[in-house]
Image: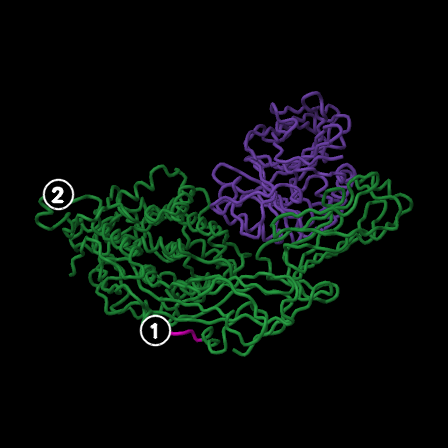
Amino acid sequence: MTASKPHRALLLAAGLLAMAGLVACTGDDEGPRMGNRGDTGASSAGGGLTTFAGLYVSADVVPVTQTETQVTLASARPCQDLSKMLAAGQWRLVDRLTYGKLSDEELALIAGFGGVAGDLLQRGDTLVFAGLEGGSACTATVSTVPRGEIKLEGGELPGTTPGWVATTRCYRSKSTGDLIVSVYFDTDAKVGGQGQVSLVKSGDGYTVDTEDTSSITLSLLRHKGRYLNTMSAGYAKMSQPEGFVELEPGDSFAGSATLQEGTADKLPAGEIVLTGLLDSNSYDAEIDISLRFACSGVVETN
Amino acid sequence: MTRTSCGARGGGVRRRTTRARWRRSTAALICAALVATGCTPGDDDEPGKAGSVDSAAVEAVAKGLPDDPAQAAEQLVADILSDDADRSAAATAELLRRSGHAIVSAKGPVVAVPDQLAMVDAPVYAELVPLLARATRAGDRYSVEEFATLLTSVGLTEKDPTFAQLTAAIGNWAKEPGDNPVFVTAAAGVRALAAHRQQVFFPGADPASVFLDPLQTTLLLGHATSRFGEVKPGAKPQALGRPGLVDRLLGGGVAHADPAGPCGEFAAIFASPGDAAGKAHADFLKGELKDRLSKEFLTEGGKEAFDKANEAWGKAGAAASAILLMLGARLDLTADKSSTHFKHRAGTRDEHVTLTATALFDAGIALDKLECYALAGVDVPKPGPMKGMTVKWDSEQPLIGGYQKGGAQLLKAISADSAKFTRGSKTGDDGKATLEVKPPVEDPAGEGEELKGKALFIAKLDKESFPFELGDAYGFLSNAVGFGIGKTFDLLKEVLVKAGLPAQTITIEVKYHGADIILAQGSNEVNLLLAKLMDVHVDLVSCTGVAGPFKGTAGYAGAESSGMLQAAGAVTGVNVPKGFAGQDNEISVMTNDREGPNPFFIMKGEGGAQFLDGVLRFYPFLNTRFEVLADYRVGRPVGDVEILLGGSSFPFSDLSWPIVRVQEDPRCPKVKYSYDGL
């Protein structure tokens, strides 16, 4: 087990790298903390949210933005409270990511590269991820999470296997249109992970930024339960969970991004394919990954 | 045995129309249910009209429901709470049926049979279903604490479960894949009923604002305590089939499925009538509330509190039925005025408000006696006012700042009535009990803006009051599946008085002059990596509540850097004005009492770029915590204020602070309030 300090250092370094590019987010109309700008959403007649039927909130939790795929809830409750409330309606808690006792500064850095605590909730076949941010006044950003085939190939990875991908943040540059996508994912084969990938605008679509590979962060975790719960246990103990590996672009690294038609300028959705990745511990077999993503909201950056 | 008349009877003068309607409907139901007794509808009795719960109404409600049991339960709850009383009663019956409650007639026949699994000891009287629907829609309530007491009273627990245990159990109940649809339906229905009131059952909920309506109470009590038996495949409700001509002529009705007579028909729906509860396959019981409750208790080391669950069997079914019957005990609560004002001089009575609670019994049942099942032998009280009942009073009022000690309520009882809050007051021959309340006196009178508040008054029939006679029951002897808790209802009475009777509420608007002081204050430094903004702050006050206007200043006190501030700003997207001396701007924000975000402008940055903005957000009902301000004033949070940098929340400094209600501020008029001696 790796000691806690190197892990923290990794977090800080990654966060600092991300910070310069991400702090400048101005966010016009959407995004996790855009409750100050968006139109006030409405609860349904049944007391739940119109976007996600059966997701119940009490009267002191206010839906501040609401689209077909995302709702942002402002509250004056601590996140622990809001989390329990969201899981007490008709949706079932499937997985939960918490950051243990990390300091506010560390949490801010994690947030800088797309990390956000939250709950994976399920109703029927539908999954949502509720990202939870804030201290005593928690904001929840609830977004749909698609299920589908995830390709994890190379070494002892399972190949193509069913799973889910939660797109936790999408940042888009106002000037260049470039996109930064952050995701969590988990598979039925008990291999999950998270990452952040920079996509460069190219014509009507996007390509993976292979020039500046430092902008790609990707990790995998082979676990025995669920990805988010296992990571939470690691954060609680301030040590990397067993089976955690970071991936780095190798010499033959290549990537591509395919966007669904008509989504590029709105809420981008599509598939990211990365090949030629290496396990940063062993540097042996090359790893190929294919993940679908779907931005439920986009933060426009300067 | 008294034969039920199938014609509608007239009601009393006060609620004549309503009662007649309910009576006709329930008579229609009974006629539908009691074909076994040879009762046939009279000419003026049309099944299906005016809130009746007959098979056609239930089938109509069930038609087109989603396949998913939770979604179906949500749809049924929407119907239950709709404006259509007929549909509401039918939906209530269908939700109960799908949740495992058989619907039975008080005279024996089974009206509706659950699918696959049914509670062996908790059938619901069909005659009481319209009453249950009415009380649920009317907002009758039991507190979670009262329900906890009820569980202990019936012997399920040795000590009352905590609010956290019960709400956690309800919030997580029957959500796992493979849970039996009976439990999924009941659980989803209970949660959906609460959601319509914008309530969520979870440990962090406010116990004062989350309650159980009568339908939730029935479902939860049944599922927490009852045993389940497998329903015989193809079991049909006897009442749904109409007797043939010969049967009618002979007056015998349909043949009873059980030789024990009409009261034995319920047992016949089970696959193993002799041991109905003993045969339910364990796989069928996945998702039981008892399991969930047990888990919650185990997590808090309270296993011993759940060891006597078996003792509850039978008692709880009887208790649930009696609770339904008690819903016939109604309280009408009225006031001689809906709005008043604080007094401008002591000794006047014009501002007083008199509340009148009228206790009535109106079960809407055209039956004199319940003849089968849990309440067999109980006489149904005659409709009319209830004399000698004790009405307990309570109130919920906002704690408005600026009040002197002793003047913190908008309305309080006059001296002569003050004991009514603790001891209650007895109803007279007309079933009425009154409470006179008074507002405080302003000093100085008329100073400041006119403000409004609302005082909620609660009238509740005292738990020692009991609306019907509990004579010896004969259900113990005549019941085929072991209903009955003994030859007397002493124990049941003990349970019921602890559960109490539903409450009713009324809201009075109260106007007053003075100040409702709301402060939005905070300051912090902002670290821009290469430089710091010192003391970014906001200081706004409203003397007129959350509607505003909020007036004051906001800005920053200067910057600390090594000539790098502009560069740091460029990196972070925060365009700081040139010159590091800082700046304060005058702010005025109107919110018009709007929930959600209320953005306001503070100042622009370099080159007119967006720099400092603010946002006020208010949250209703957030008045239970205290904040101690820097000057040691104590405030109650009502929302939060945040300063935005470059239009966004700044992730590396906390620029969000609570908005609080305080008792005084030098910027607002100071008015004192005190009560006179009346």
In the rendered image, the vertical position of residue A103 relative to residue B508, given as above or below: above
Q: Which quarter of the figure has residue B317?
A: bottom left
Q: Crowding near pointer 2: few (<14 within 10 Å), some, many (20+)?
A: few
Q: Quadrant of the C terminus of chain A?
A: top right
Chain B color in figure = green
Residue B428, labelled with which disc? 1
**Residue at image location 84% in from the left, 40% down from the top:** B606
Please state the extent of the stretch shown in magenta in the rendering.
B423-428
Can see residue A185?
yes
Q: Chain of mark 1?
A: B
Task: State the image coordinates of residue A124 (x, y, percent, origin top left).
Answer: 47, 39
Residue type at mark 1? Gly
Q: Position of residue B459 (x, y in %)?
A: 43, 66
- Dot 1: element: loop
B50 relative position to B645: left or right: left
* Residue B64 place in picture, x, y as percent: 36, 37
* Residue shown at 17% from the left, 44% from the top: B242
Mark 1 and mark 2 in contact (Cβ < 8 Å)? no
Direction right: furthest residue: B563
| Residue underneath mark 2 | B244
Which secondary structure, mark 2?
loop
Q: Colour of chain A?
A: purple
